[in-house]
Amino acid sequence: MSVVTALDRPLSRLGTIGVMLLALAGVALIGMIDYVTGYEVSVSEFYLLPLTVAAWYKGRLAAVIIAALCCTSWYVADTAAGRPAGDEAVAVWNTVVRLVFLVVTGVLLDALRTSFDAQRRLARTDGLTGLLVRRAFNDQLQRTLALARRHGDPITLAYIDVDDFKLLNDSRGHAEGDRLLWSIGDVLARSLRTSDAAGRLGGDEFALILPRTDAGGARQLVNRLNATLHQTFATNDWDVGCSIGVVTLRNTGMYPEAALTTADALMYDVKRQGKGTVAFRVLDGRDVRPTHIHTARSACQ
């Protein structure tokens, strides 16, 4: 773990007051050092540190405030250290120049952080539906399974595939197909709890992570969700349906890939048996490795 990563985590958890107090402490400390070192040895460049903290974690307004305080601290420390007489105009000019430099630097840092956050969101979320992409979904699944094993909680996975999506795309165009996919993402986002996660794993395939959800809770939630999806399809005159495989894991050390592939295989069982329904399964085992599940998956194709 890098030093930057180690510092970023606690700083990201600080609220506005915490970040501003930390930045103010930095300004005060650098001001004291600036006073001790005297007029001829300036440490004003170090004011970039509290400015960076404020701009990166709390935005443009915080950066402007800290920039003004940095320049005030520098001017006061410089004056108290015994600046030669007659240099007042130069000191004021230098303060104004430093203020402009620090404000511009803070604004640029805020813009960089905004761009960084946007790129990170794009890397984790699907551009059409706003749901997690496969890699981010797998990461979330791995964390959720680890927590479930630690606390002994059940966890449910659901794998959703849109039936006859290709026919809709071919008959009504890709724009209509995209609108259908967006609507599914919207329904999933509105219907799930804050602790749940939904992902678009590719094409017309979606998956859900339902932490602390047993078989009974999964049945109620998924059946309600399936009804909402079909109502959305009917309202928009979309002649499609959903095949859903739902797996509830209890006391299992299953690998994330195996858990997801189990739900995928169950969904394909639904497709083989006529599409448009939901199949539920409960697993209560010790350790199921991915290779075992892939064998079952190939039998379902």
Image (spheres, rainbow, N blue to C red):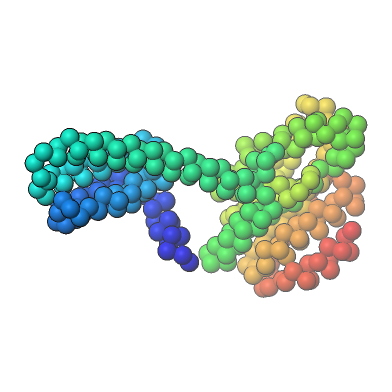
At horizontal 70% and vertical 38% (from top left) the residue drawn is: 128
At horizontal 71% and vertical 35% (from top left) the residue drawn is: 182
> Based on the displayed image, in which of its 4 quarters is residue 179 positioned?
top right
At horizontal 48% and vertical 66% (from top left) the residue drawn is: 1
Closest to the observer, 94 or 161: 94
Residue 23 % position (x, y): 29, 48
Closest to the observer, 14 or 94: 94
Residue 140 appearing in the image: yes
For the C terminus, the image quarter is: bottom right
Q: Is residue 272 left or right of residue 67?
A: right
Closest to the observer, 2 or 132: 2
Residue 2 % position (x, y): 46, 65
User: Relative to 259, does residue 101 appear above or below in the rendering?
Assistant: above
> Based on the displayed image, in which of its 4 quarters is residue 282 positioned?
bottom right
At horizontal 53% and vertical 42% (from top left) the residue drawn is: 115
Residue 174 % position (x, y): 83, 34
Task: Report the residue that reaches farthest toward the front.
Answer: 86
Q: Is residue 169 left or right of residue 69?
A: right
